[in-house]
Amino acid sequence: MSNTDQPKKVSLQELMKQKLADKQQSKNAGQGHKMATKSAQPLQSQQTKKRNNQRKRTGV
């Protein structure tokens, strides 16, 4: 049997470094795209303002 058929054993430390590098690359790649779309859309309030009906309630 040759060594090319079996996958190389990777230590946990090396695996975590690879995962962290992949995570940072995806974060940096997605960050530029997210900023471009966010700046194009105007900000909107997520709460709807209710009309003040205090005069109606008090009878003034």
Image: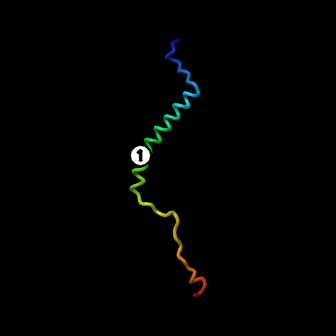
Asked if 51 appears above or below 35 in the picture, the reply is: below
Give the percent coordinates (x, y) of residue 11.
57, 25
Q: Position of residue 3 (x, y in %)?
A: 51, 15
Toward the top, the furthest residue is 1
> In the rendering, at what x and y percent does residue 27 appear?
47, 42
Q: Nearer the viewer, residue 47 or 35?
A: 35
Spot occupied by residue 1 in the image (x, y as percentages of width and height): 53, 11
Q: Residues within 10 Å of mark 1 (few under 14, many from 20)?
A: few
In this view of the protein, which residue sits in the foreground, 25 or 59?
25
Q: Is residue 1 left or right of residue 29?
A: right
Vertical position of residue 41 compared to residue 17: above or below: below
| 18 shown above or below 60 | above
Dot 1 corresponds to which residue?
32
The quarter of the image holding the C terminus is: bottom right
Please name the colour scheme applied to the rendered image.
rainbow
User: Please, what is the three-letter code of the amino acid marked with disc 1?
Assistant: Gly
Residue 54, image quadrant:
bottom right
